[in-house]
Image (tube, rainbow, N blue to C red):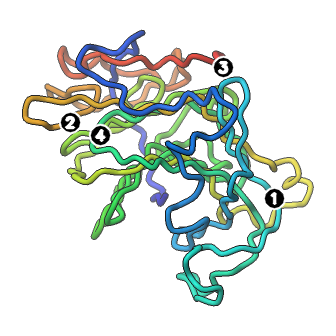
Amino acid sequence: MRILPIILFLAFPAARAVSQEQPGWKLVFHDEFDSAALNRDKWMDAYPWGRSICSTGELCYYSPGANYGFADGALTLYTRKESIRAKAIEYEADDKALCDNRPNLRTFEYTSGMIYSKQEFLYGYFEIRFRVSKGRGLWPAFWLYGSDSDEIDVFELFGDELDKIGTNIHYQGECMCHGRDIQLKNGKMLSRQFNVMAVEWKPGLVIWFLNGDTIRIQAHDFTRPMHVIANTSVDWKVGGQSKRKLRKMFPAAFEIDYIRVYQRDFPKGRQVGLHSIKAKWTPAKVLIGKSGNGLHKRAMAPPKGTLPVVRKMAGKKHQQ
């Protein structure tokens, strides 16, 4: 969950959403969150190594079983302003100094919720339907994470800048220059309505989608499987706010309608995502205006065969 503040003022032409998946694609993992409890066969509620991480500056503790709820067929990950004394890394000694030079056993002023898939996936199409709370210091994210710090951020958001969607990739020895902020015309859409974001990850390429629009393409060849993660962190920007503002902001909510993963097998055993890029095209400049999903209008249509339509994007609940 790292990002560089580079604003992207380009919009990519995208596939149009359809009502059903095309033949050859398989739903390999999903959670519709229709039950009244977290599916422990699918999810952990913390990182494998512990309930916080110091390397990214997170200020919260991911409480076991305490910061999520279920209602109307959706999961809500809650973030609360409350103190708890606990270990950041469960297997380390209490007095072990971590990367921030503080002892492992510490007092956290915030708690939050997380889901971390037990299963790993190599390639595919990773989709979430969600809504988030606004507020300075909130840091919700949906991302993929694997060995050797391989990472694809489907999105990471800052609660006081919801007119931007952070997209990123990370890997060992990277230049830390892959961060892109996707600029939205409607800065309220992410907190007022449910939206669908997805990543198509195939050999050599990662493609980001928002409500059916292609918003970014990045070339990189991730070759190791990754876990699926959704969480809300709290960062340093939460400081300096009045008690009244904090009382209004917390508890914050990251509502998740569903998470789905699709994969397809090709003759040589290589997985690709739900869209197959077969032609080159030039990104279109953003045209300020209205569109059906709250994004900028696209300036051009993709050439025939570029992004064939194959996947349902509409949600089953919480229609706006």
Q: Position of residue 299 (x, y in %)?
A: 36, 21
Residue 233 at least partly seen = yes
As shown in the figure, which amino acid type bears the numbered disc 1?
Lys
- Is disc 1 placed on a helix, strand or loop? strand
Judged left or right of residue 265, residue 135 is right
Gap between marks 2 and 4, in whole Å?
9 Å
Mark nearer the N terminus (2 vs 1) = 1
Residue 109, image x, y percentages: 78, 68
Query: Measuring 36% from the left and 18% from the top, which residue is drawn there?
Result: 311
Residue on which the image places disc 3 = 318
Residue identified by numbered label 2: 271
Which numbered mark, 2 or 3, is in the foreground of this view? 2
Q: Amino acid at mark 4?
A: Trp
Local packing at callout 2 (Cα closer than 10 Å; few below 14, some 14-19, many 20+) is: some
Residue plotted at (86% across, 53% down): 245
Say left or right for 80 vs 256.
right
Q: Nearer the viewer, residue 271 or 130?
A: 271
Camera-nearest label, 2 or 4: 2
Q: Earlier in the sequence, mark 4 or mark 3?
A: 4
Q: Secondary structure at mark 2?
A: strand
Q: Quadrant location of residue 284?
A: top left
Side of 220 relative to 139 (left or right): left
Precedes in sequence: disc 2 or disc 4? 4
**Cα–Cα gap, marks 4 and 3:** 27 Å
- Residue most extreme to the front: 41
Asked which quadrant contains residue 269, the reply is: top left
Q: Secondary structure at mark 3?
A: loop
For residue 201, the mark is 4
In the picture, the quarter occupied by the C terminus is top right
Q: Report, in whole angstroms, how far the alpha carbon at label 1 lies from the one at label 4.
A: 36 Å
On the image, the x and y values in percent for residue 282 come to 23, 31
